[in-house]
Image (spheres, rainbow, N blue to C red):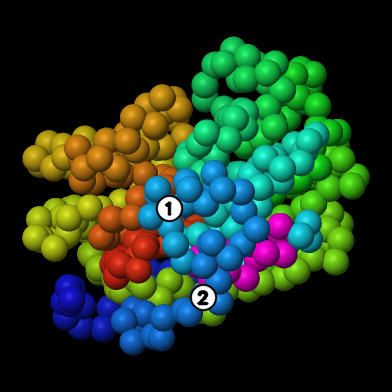
Amino acid sequence: MSYNYRSQKPQYRKSYSSSSRPPRNSNRSRKKYIDPSLYVVAASAENSKPYISTNNFDDFNLHGLIKKNLLSKGYATPSPIQDQTIAAALEGRDIIGIASTGTGKTGSFVLPILQKLITGRGHRALIVAPTRELAEQIDQECRDLARDTGIKRALLIGGVNMSGQLRALRERPQLVIGTPGRIKDHMRRGSLKLNFFNTVVLDEVDRMLDMGFIKDVTEILNTTNDNRQSMFYSATLDSKVDGLIKNFSKEPLTVSISSRPTSEYVHQDVIVYSSNDVKVDKLIDLLNKKEVSKVLVFDETQRNVEKLGKLLDSRGFSTEAIHGGRSQGQRKRALARFKSNEVNILVATDVAARGIDVVDITHVVNYSTPNDYQDYIHRIGRAGRAGRIGYALTFIEK
């Protein structure tokens, strides 16, 4: 598919880093310069060889109820990250999984955890995720795969009333899933004591550290049982992530699935505009294309997201908005409507860049450029999931 927006070689306006002259918008002053050529990449998965798994889920030492629930979800063959980590995790080894979004990371740690909780007395597990949406996604996967096992769970996220979480914690759940801030809230209240938790998972470690959670995460890990199994999953492994993992793991198995820095299932291109009016018109033209059926549009601030959502509503599009200024209930309802196709356009800030698992998103539109290249990778990873080819288009000012 060709969008043909680049009729001539464009001259791009460079985004300033914090060490350069800051532009008027203070949020933009935090942006790193990204060479626009990085936004133009053809999908390569169409010609790549499919991964051949060495195992089926039936080969793993999993309880019969777990295998039954896997079959009910239609899961038969593990993804690469699952194929290469589940057996070692079942043996109790620490795991470092480096894999991009949409690769099945959740199943690779949830399945060994559920097996341990079903078959071993006194085991308790903690899963920490950077965002509410990702924590809820993990909780849903645990709910599905643990059906009829009797495993009690507690979901600890911000933006919702504490009372339900306190009730769940009083029932002494074997599995706790949450975000760092709300987990710390419960630790301070004394409603969550982690010294008995002997399995810990940190999902999207790089994102947690980017969001400034390193002190919270370190305190959480220090409070858990010394004799624990630790599993860390991340899209990238920089020095900060590597340092944290080394401090809290013992002879881990490292499995790296990411073979390239961008999603191989996503066609990437740019849309060049010369003014805000032209920018809006080009977005409208794009959204009116027949093949653009389900779209995630990223904008820079909460205010911009609200404004853009209202503008698209006024043009007759079916739209929802999601950002950090909305309550958890509002965010959950917006995402549910998007998943169920009640609306086909979701406008979001980067709060939605991780934790949104909607397999049929056809297009990701970067209406504003991301703060850095890793944010870009996480944004476009919302398309091209479950083996589908997706499209990512980034607006660049001429």
> In the displayed structure, would residue 48 be above or below residue 87?
below
Amino acid on which the number 1 mark rests in the picture: Leu
Q: Nearer the viewer, mark 1 or mark 2?
A: 1
* Mark closer to the chain start, 1 or 2: 2
The residue lying furthest to the front in this view is: 64
Magenta span: predominant SS is: helix
Residue situated in front as seen by the camera: 230 or 131: 230
Instruction: Tell me what residue is drawn at x 52 percent, y 25 percent.
Output: 159
> The C terminus appears in which quarter of the rendering?
bottom left
Q: Is residue 246 magenta?
A: no
Residue situated in front as seen by the camera: 294 or 373: 294
Q: How far across and down, in percent of the image, does residue 145 sit? A: 51, 44
Disc 1 residue crowd, few under 14, some 14–19, many 20+, Cα 10 Å: some
Amino acid on which the number 2 mark rests in the picture: Ser
Q: How far across and down, in percent of the image, does residue 172 sit? A: 72, 22
Q: From which residue to which does the magenta span run?
A: 78-90
Q: Regarding mark 2 in the picture, which secondary structure is present there?
A: loop
> In the displayed structure, would residue 366 be above or below residue 304?
below
